[in-house]
Structures are given as C-alpha cells and as structure tokens.
Amino acid sequence: MFSKIDMDAHKNLFAKTNLTTSVRFITAAKITAKKFCNGNNNMSAILFAIMGDFDSANKLMTGYQRNAVADIAFSEDKCHQLREFFLDIYNDDDVLLDFLNAKITERSISLNRSKKGRNKEEVIDFSKQIINDDLLANLDLNF
C-alpha cells in the first residue's frame, strides 16, 4: 500500500493521465519542435507547418513572410512529415505522458535540491573520492 506521502508525491510529481486538449496540443507541438527544429522550441514554425496551406490561392502570408516570422523554412514535403508526426504524437498518451513526466522530474529535482553549503575544497575532495572509489576501483590498471 502507498503511504500518504507516496500518494501526495505521485499526485504532484507526475502528469495527470487524462490530458486536456490544450496540454495535449502544446506537448505534441513541443515534441514535434524538438524533432524538426533541431531541439529548439520554435512554436511559430510548428504552427505554420501544421496550419500552412500550400495549395490555397488566398494565403495570408507568403512563404518568405512565414520564414521570416518562424526563422526556419520547411518544404511542402517536410511540412507533410511534420503534420503526420504531430498527429501521431498528439494521439499517443504514452509518449505525451513520458515527455511530461520527464520534464516534471527534471524540474522537481532542481527545485527541491537543497544546497549543503560546502566550500570549494570539500566539493573537490568529495568529487575525487566518488570518482576514485566508485569509477576507478574496478579498473585493472596493471598493464
């Protein structure tokens, strides 16, 4: 059985399983941006690619204008790949929850980590001890 502390941690440190439409959209867009924008969170480029209509005669913005706003240029084929990827991610709860839980974990560890107030020499000594005892202890240096 989970204790009260475990239940509170699970409630606060993990993403909800019933994702709202807005959370689903933003998360899928962030994952898509990571894949297609070299890791940058370029939401304008993703939105233009998802909503872009290459066939429309009455475009609101020309390709040059979109490229200037988004700071990246996607071909029609790349936009099609991006849309397919986005739709796959948008409908995959496991991928969305994994991404969100990773972000929550990353942020909770950095926020909850308390500083011990060690001086520089102590930090260097502790680091050397960890490296020498844990990493190098099992190496056979007799060659």
Image (cartoon, rainbow, N blue to C red):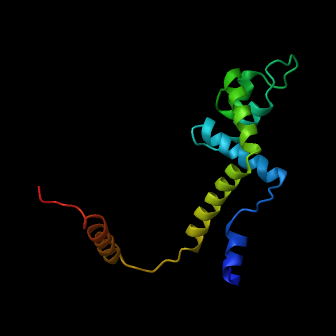
Name which residue lies at 74% across and 26% down.
65
11 and 35: which one is in front?
Answer: 11
Residue at the extreme bottom of the image, as rendered: 4
Quarter of the image with the C terminus is bottom left
Name which residue lies at 72% across and 45% down.
28
Name which residue lies at 68% across and 46% down.
30
Reply above or below: 106 against 64: below
Is residue 88 visible in the rendered structure shown here? yes
Residue at the extreme right of the image, as rendered: 58
Left or right of 109, for residue 26 = right
Which percent across, then down, holds residue 8?
A: 71, 77
Which percent across, then down, holds residue 96?
A: 70, 51
Reply above or below: 17 against 40: below
Left or right of 18, for residue 142 = left
Name which residue lies at 75% across and 48% down.
26
Which percent across, then down, holds residue 131?
A: 30, 67
Which percent across, then down, holds residue 41?
A: 64, 44
Is residue 75 visible in the rendered structure shown here? no
